[in-house]
Image (cartoon, rainbow, N blue to C red):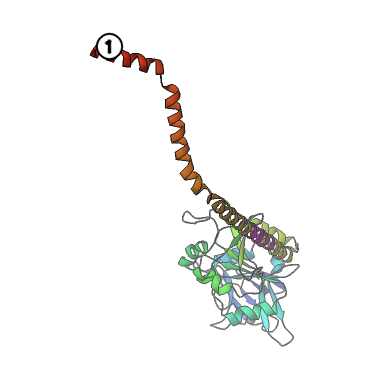
Amino acid sequence: MKFAFVGAERREAQPDLVAKCPDPDCGAVVFARCGEHNVWHWAHKGARNCGDHWGEPETPWHRGWKNEFPESWQEVHHKAADGERHVADVKTELGYIEFQHSPLTPDERRSREDFYPNLVWVVDGRRRAQDRAQFFASIDGRISDSPPIFPILPNKCALLRDWLVSGVPVYFDFGDSEPGDTWRFKEPLLWLLTPCRPNGKPYLVSVRKTWFLRVHNEGRPAEGLYTKKVERVVADYLSRQAAADSRRQAQAAADSRRQRRAAAADQPLKGWERYLPKKAKAAAADRSLADFDFERYLTNRQRRAQGRF
Ligand SMILES: [Zn+2]
């Protein structure tokens, strides 16, 4: 955990400090862990932990994301009516953001989604080496530029399959564009898997990381609006596709009708085919008669007769 109480003050871990666990139901002594390998954090004595994901040290990725939000929004404790306790990574003015580096079991994922109203996930896409290539390979074209919406083939990507059943927005963080990416981008993007399935299929939307941070820090109701926008754009795209399909079908039907008509009209030409060469031959004969020089013919005949006699 990043914060614990030193006296009444909520503080980050510093070497040799001892503090009190901020969980009101715990209050145990916690110790500053300020080594070189892990980000500095507070830990309970031994293996004991009381928060839901404080068993493992935070990654720099996790800490980096939390630091993008006001301190008072980070590590907010919650206790449900049934006594279930959780610590939210970030509680914004409108909801909750959980940063997920390690894999979650389906039960853990569902329990968080049920627990936190207006939850969004940010998932570390760079934890497993193969996820990046699989993720970009699963993008199946693009159907809109504004916002950029991509149909996906989730069977090609284990990470997408894991999150497909989530009922809330899931943002995948792959950081900056890398040379091998099939889709290149100029600044860090997040890839949003929206909870809507307009035609029963999942869609990704790319958003700037700066946009995500701005809307959540400013408490703007972006998530619901964005999901609706994606639903609308995909529905428009699908109805345009359907219209284009039926135009193509109508065109194909008209073409084949026209071809059938032309073929029928071609039949009498079989007679013409016989007639035309005959007519051409007759015309040639006429021309040879007209060209015939009768005078010259007689003269030549006379000359030959005179020569012979
Ligand atoms: Zn505790």
Instruction: Pick the residue in front: 24 or 172.
Output: 172
- The picture places residue 147, in percent across and down from the top left corner, at 66, 56
Quadrant occupied by the N terminus: bottom right
Count of all numbered marks drawn on residues in the image: 1
- Where in the figure is residue 229, as x and y percent of width and height? 71, 61
Residue 233 vertical position relative to residue 34 in the rendered view, above or below: above
User: Is 101 located above or below residue 24 in the figure?
Assistant: above
Q: Residue 71 appears in which quarter of the rendering?
A: bottom right
Q: Is residue 240 magenta?
A: yes
Element at badge 1?
A: helix
Look at the picture and state if 115 lies above or below 220. Answer: below
Of 286 and 174, which appears nearest the observer?
286
Residue 206 appears anywhere in the view: no
Q: Residue at horizontal 59%, vertical 66%?
A: 63
Determine if the magenta segment contains residue 60: no
| Residue 283 in view of the camera | yes
Residue stretch in magenta: 235-248
> Splitting the image into four quadrants, where does ligand 1 fall?
bottom right
Q: Residues within 10 Å of mark 1 (few under 14, many from 20)?
A: few
Residue under label 1, please give it. 306
Task: Estimate the x, y position of residue 106 in percent, counting from the top left.
Answer: 58, 80
Q: In what quadrant of the picture does the C terminus appear?
A: top left
Residue 234 is situated, as x and y percent measured from the top left of the image, at 66, 62
**With 59 as the anchor, is 197 left or right in this view?**
right
- The amino acid type found where label 1 is placed reads Gln
Residue at the extreme bottom of the image, as rendered: 82
Residue farthest along the front direction in this orientation? 309
Q: Nearer the viewer, residue 268 or 168?
A: 268
- For the residue pair 55 and 138, the one nearer the viewer reads as 138
